[in-house]
Amino acid sequence: PAPFFLDCDTGIDDALALAYLLASPGAELVGIGTVSGNVSAAGGAKNTLDLLKLAGHPDIPVAVGAHDPQVGTFHGGAPHVHGDNGIGGVDLAPSDHEPVEASAAELLVRLAHQYAGELRLVAIGPLTNIAQALRLEPALPQLIAEVTIMGGAALAPGNITAVAEANIANDPEAAAEVLAADWNVTLVPLDVTMTNVLEENHRQELLATEHPVSQALGEMLGYYFGFYVDIFGRACSAMHDPLAAAIAVRGVELTVAPTVRVQVDTTDGPGRGQTVCDLRGQYAGFPEQRGARCRVVLEIGEDFAPHLLGTLQA
Ligand code: BDR
Ligand code: CA
């Protein structure tokens, strides 16, 4: 299996992504960083450690990362989406492990050297830690094999403002730095994470298993569905973070993902936090773009929920 580093703001869909990576035969999770987003960075680390204990992997190092974005301060989280504790009010048995001493950025840099050329980075929260790691180790892009980010919106509307998605909106300056760095990034935006959903029958399937992690995820999804019912008009939810994790593990072969130039709007106007994706290359004969290095996933060519559930229950 390939070594993976997960940077997250755990979070209900982050919990799904974590469980998916732990269960994937193609992935070995060697470290986790947390960042404020759905909950504080410290709260996300607690949720992550408790989930790791439940999953029987208590020893994977978890590092607390940035509490505040580069500009401004942490807004306090998204309890209306993820519950006060970030995992839908589900009470997990507390882990007896503490986060490691290092910051998330320090742990990422350390592991990037240890697994030079092999480490895969999956970022499913605001990109503050990743921008910090780039400043700590400017050679990071050469050390990391691949970066997969859940974030942004190419042609779809935003979910925080008309055009901005939460992970990018929570730290646009960091996102701009990360997307401008010299590495190959796959962006998994709202275009696909809002159109591939988990339905009530999937939730019931999780609840009916013997597996404690799947059962806990089924309970958390009850809360998550309560938020999305107002958006989709039925009990179901978007699948943001596990979709990004799956694309990181399996590659983009089953997707439509053109390589384009992506810029992040860091102005103070209504576009702040927008991922401006230059998709003009779809016109035959349009000259090749300079600086096009980000694969933007626009379509998924499979029914993803059965793959997720099958992996979790294997
Ligand atoms: C993203 O923001 C967070 O709320 C979710 O966990 C996901 O990473 C979706 O916009
Ligand atoms: Ca997340």
Image (spheres, helix red, strand yellow):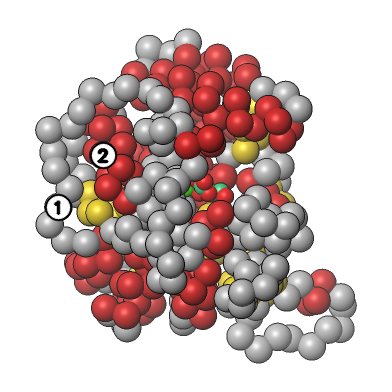
The answer to whether residue 25 shows anywhere in this view is: no
- Using the image, tell me which numbered label, if any, was put on residue 199: none
Above-or-below relation of 21 to 165: above
Q: Are marks 2 and 1 in contact (CB under 8 Å)?
A: no
Write down the residue under mark 1: 100
Q: Is residue 213 left or right of residue 297?
A: left
Residue 170 x, y percent position in the rendering = 50, 60
Q: Residue at x 23, y 54 (%)?
A: 63
Q: How many marks?
A: 2
Residue 46 x, y percent position in the rendering = 26, 39
The answer to whether residue 102 shows anywhere in this view is: yes
Amino acid on which disc 2 is placed:
Lys
Write down the residue under mark 2: 46
Q: Residue at x 67, y 56 (%)?
A: 161
Residue 65 x, y percent position in the rendering = 28, 58
Q: Quadrant of residue 50?
A: top left
Q: Which tag is nearer the camera, tag 2 or tag 1?
A: 2
Distance from disc 2 to disc 1, alpha carbons, whole Å, reads 12 Å
Residue 9 x, y percent position in the rendering = 40, 48
Q: Residue at x 21, y 45 (%)?
A: 60
Q: Nearer the viewer, residue 62 or 2?
A: 62
Instruction: Give the class, few, some or many, for how many residues have Cα within 10 Å of label 1's Cα (few <14, many ≥20).
Output: some
Above-or-below relation of 97 to 2: above
Q: Is residue 229 left or right of residue 41?
A: right
Above-or-below relation of 11 to 216: below
Element at label 1: loop
Q: Quadrant of residue 283?
A: bottom right
Element at label 2: helix
Q: Earlier in the sequence, mark 2 or mark 1?
A: 2
Quadrant, the C terminus: top left
Amino acid on which disc 1 is placed:
Val
Label 1 lies in ligand 2 vicinity (Cβ under 8 Å): no
